[in-house]
Amino acid sequence: MSERLRNIAMAGVLLAMAGALVLLVATNPTDADRVEAIGERIKCPVCQGESIANSPSQLARDMMAVIEQRVAEGQSDEAIVDELLASYSGAVLLDPPASGWTLVLWLAPILALGGGVAVILWWRGHPVPERTDPVPQAEQSKAHRLAPLLILAGAFAAIVVVAGFFLQDRAGPNAGVADLSSRNLEDVSNETMQAVIDANPDHPQVDGMRLALAERYYEETNYRAAFPHYLAVAESPNATEPQVVTALVRLGWMTWQGNAEAETAIDLFDQALAIDQDSTTARYLKAQVLWCGPGDTEEASILLEAVRTDPDVDDDVRRFVTADLEAIRSGEACA
């Protein structure tokens, strides 16, 4: 094989290896890569030309949390992008999306191999001058033949180094962050959850978000804000039975606490118990309303006794229930 053919063959082998390496890295993204790539495609609604992946704003972080959740659920990139664009006013696609280490990874093989070929062409255009000493001339000719191969090998080594840094970055502390399901909705602000709910009122998965937002308002005793969300969950055809039970129980207690409407509250508790007859929360709160409202201590005692003897009830709760039972049996008024 001539020197020219050897150089061409080696260049082809190195180019194929570099292409295979890039293809391997580019076609096997981690969940964290997908989250970052999707975030870089979407413009932050409250920023000036910045993607949500690079924005420090709370809204951008909330949107990234939604992306992480959807990626963990196995949704496609386009489905996630479509959901975000539909849910957040002002969110648009950025063009072009290529940036950062991904862009470097794609450009590095081209630049490295292009540089190597350019050096080889230059080298071949400057032949080794003739010398009268045969031994040094032979050694120099051998070095001249090996130089193109060394240059291409160096170019490939540069590609491997760049890919190595890229892969190391992928395996860093942010890798697999999309699998941290514990974040779920905890890092999403009330405003963002409300925006998503408003944009997707009939989405099958929106009931979970409604209930989470309602629970936040309930804990803050902001019943006015919590009420419509609980009501929507209670009436939703997509809500699960535990979600409906929780919504009905909360609605019953807020009705009693807010307006002292004992009859409506009891009816809501009964609806919850019709779905889950073992709901200790529904039993206990219904007993409280019966005792404190119409004064039906007999039925209240039956409900409280059922809660007290439930083996799954926490000891602290059992002590409270026992104290209520003793108060009723001793003729004490509702506290």
Image (cartoon, helix red, strand yellow):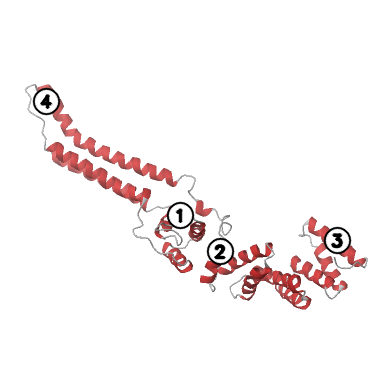
Per the rendering, the mark at residue 137 is 4
Give the CA separation, mark 3 to mark 4: 104 Å
Please name the amino acid that badge 3 sits on: Thr
Mark 4 burial class by Cα count in 10 Å: few <14, some 14-19, many 20+: some
Give the CA separation, mark 4 to mark 2: 78 Å
Per the rendering, the mark at residue 322 is 3
Which quadrant would residue 326 be assigned to in this image? bottom right
Give the residue drawn at x 83%, y 58%.
Answer: 319
Ranked by sequence position, the earlier of labels 2 and 3 is: 2
For mark 4, give the secondary structure: helix
The residue carrying mark 2 is 191
Q: Taking 149 as reference, is 267 above or below it?
A: below
Q: Taking 314 as reference, is 158 above or below it?
A: above
For mark 1, give the secondary structure: loop
Give the CA separation, mark 1 to mark 4: 62 Å
Ranked by sequence position, the earlier of labels 3 and 4 is: 4
Ranked by sequence position, the earlier of labels 4 and 2 is: 4
Give the CA separation, mark 2 to mark 3: 41 Å
Mark 3 burial class by Cα count in 10 Å: few <14, some 14-19, many 20+: some
Give the residue drawn at x 63%, y 66%.
Answer: 214
For mark 2, give the secondary structure: helix
Quadrant (top left/top right/bottom left/bottom right) for the C terminus: bottom right
Quadrant (top left/top right/bottom left/bottom right) for the N terminus: top left
Nearer the observer: mark 1 or 3; the answer is: 1
Q: Which of these two is toward me, 266 or 161?
A: 266
**Can the viewer see residue 6 in this picture?**
no
Give the residue drawn at x 36%, y 52%.
Answer: 99
Mark 2 burial class by Cα count in 10 Å: few <14, some 14-19, many 20+: few
